[in-house]
Amino acid sequence: MKRKSKNVYKKFLVLSLIVGVFVFSVKGIDQYFLSDKNENVPLSISFMNEGKDIPVSKSLVLGDEWLIPDDSVAYLSQSALPGTGGNVVMYGHNTRNVLGFLNNVENGDSITLVNQSGKEYEYKVWEKKVVDPDMIEIAQPTEYEMLTVYTCTGWNDSKRLVIRAYPSRVASN
């Protein structure tokens, strides 16, 4: 009987080691994308007409899972950085302290991103639409710079409210 329990214990240790290595690998990927090595990473997003200034956290997609912070807007670290051309993708929960007001944003409104060195990037809203959750094209890279911000909407969060904006100016810090 003791021999059998030793084998079970060894199998448990091997399995724990394998799971630990896997988790460490995922955390390593996570830390690579979430590290603060690039000063162009946005730290805050402001919606001037709404009087909202919200902190930004770096986030990423792991497999099919979009990591979403509870108390800030997520910057998709696999998307373009502000000022580099391409699609800058940001998303967050439809809550009062994050993006619950996004439905009030209108075409022509200003959105400002501020990066780690204090540089501001201003965008003007040109599109507001509701899409199905599987319309991942909104987060795909583009050949021109744009800002894509979205949140859940609809009954039981069955849709996504998407705001698209083009760059209107870059201010120095």
Image: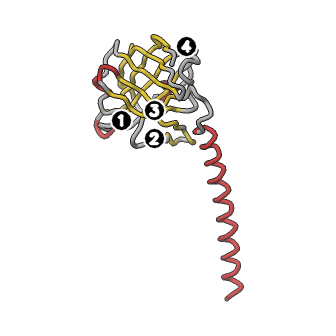
Q: Is 113 placed left or right of 31 in the picture?
A: left
The earlier-in-sequence mark between 2 and 3 is: 2
Which mark is nearer the camera, 2 or 1? 1
Amino acid type, mark 2: Ile
- Mark 3 surroundings within 10 Å by alpha-carbon count, few (fewer than 14), some (14 through 19), many (20 or more): few
Label 2 – label 3 distance at C-alpha = 17 Å
Depth order, front residue of 134/169:
169
Task: Classify mark 2: helix, strand or loop.
Answer: loop
The earlier-in-sequence mark between 2 and 1 is: 2
Tally of numbered tags: 4
Tell me the residue at 39%/13% (across/down).
126
Task: Classify mark 4: helix, strand or loop.
Answer: loop
Q: Point out residue 87 in the picture as x, y percentages from the top left corner.
A: 53, 21
The earlier-in-sequence mark between 4 and 3 is: 3
* Residue 98: quadrant of the picture: top left
Amino acid type, mark 1: Val
Vertical comparison of 136 with 3: above or below: above
Q: Which residue is mark 2?
A: 68
Label 4 – label 1 distance at C-alpha = 27 Å
Label 3 – label 1 distance at C-alpha = 22 Å
Q: Which residue is mark 3?
A: 134
Tell me the residue at 57%/16% (across/down).
85
Q: Do labels 4 and 3 touch, CB within 8 Å?
A: no
Residue 98 is tagged as 1
The earlier-in-sequence mark between 2 and 4 is: 2
Which mark is nearer the camera, 4 or 1? 1
